[in-house]
Image (spheres, grey):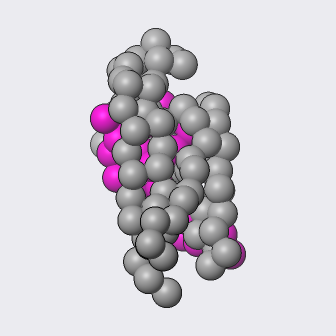
């Protein structure tokens, strides 16, 4: 596995100390193709991870931490993943939005 810790502290990463790990709330989902989607911590990032080797395939900043379990759904054969961005579990940035991503076709 590429990284056995989940989440990073930006201030430590800037000092050359990556992969510190962070407290997590919320869960993950895994697609039939083996993509694990998770936000769940206060670094405010949403990640797609290869469930077999732990490699981060996609990472993006959310408007507020996604302290929730993502959901997936389909519309007209297109698969989406959505995450609630409410934050506030740690007293940091708060939000009230949902962010959805489309998955590429197989």
Q: Is residue 4 magenta?
A: no
**Residue ID at (33%, 45%):** 61
**Going 36% across and 24% down the picture, which residue do you hit?**
95
Q: How many marks?
A: 0
Between 8 and 68, the residue placed more toward the observer is 68
Name the residue furthest top. 91
Left or right relative to 10: residue 33:
right
User: Which residue is situated farthest in the front direction here?
Assistant: 76
Give the quarter of the figure containing the N terminus: bottom right
Q: Is residue 24 visible?
A: no
- Where is residue 58 drawn, in percent x and y? 41, 64
Q: Nearer the viewer, residue 47 or 2?
A: 47
In the image, what residue occupies the spot 51% across and 65% down? 74
Taking depth in this image into account, of 10 and 26 the one nearest to the observer is 26
Residue 78 visible to the viewer: yes
Asked if the magenta segment contains residue 57, the reply would be: yes
Indicate the position of residue 52 as horizontal and vertical percent values.
68, 75
Q: Residue 46 location in percent, x, y?
A: 44, 49
Residues drawn in magenta: 39-63
Left or right: 78 in relation to 71: left
Relative to 13, is 30 above or below? below
Q: Is residue 48 above or below residue 92?
A: below
Q: Residue at x 31, y 35 (%)?
A: 63
Q: Quadrant of residue 105?
A: bottom left
Q: Is 13 displayed left or right of 19 in the figure? A: left
Whole-percent x, y for residue 27 in the image: 66, 43
């Amino acid at each position: 596995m590429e990284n056995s810790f989940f989440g990073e502290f930006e201030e430590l990463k800037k000092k050359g100390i990556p992969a510190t790990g962070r407290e997590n709330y919320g869960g993950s989902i895994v697609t039939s193709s083996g993509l694990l989607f998770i936000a769940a911590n206060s670094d405010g990032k949403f990640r797609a991870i290869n469930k077999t080797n732990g490699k981060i395939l996609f990472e993006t900043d959310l408007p507020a931490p996604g302290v929730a379990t993502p959901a997936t759904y389909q519309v007209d054969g297109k698969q989406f993943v959505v995450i609630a961005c409410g934050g506030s579990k740690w007293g940091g940035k708060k939000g009230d939005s949902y962010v959805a991503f489309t998955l590429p076709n197989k």
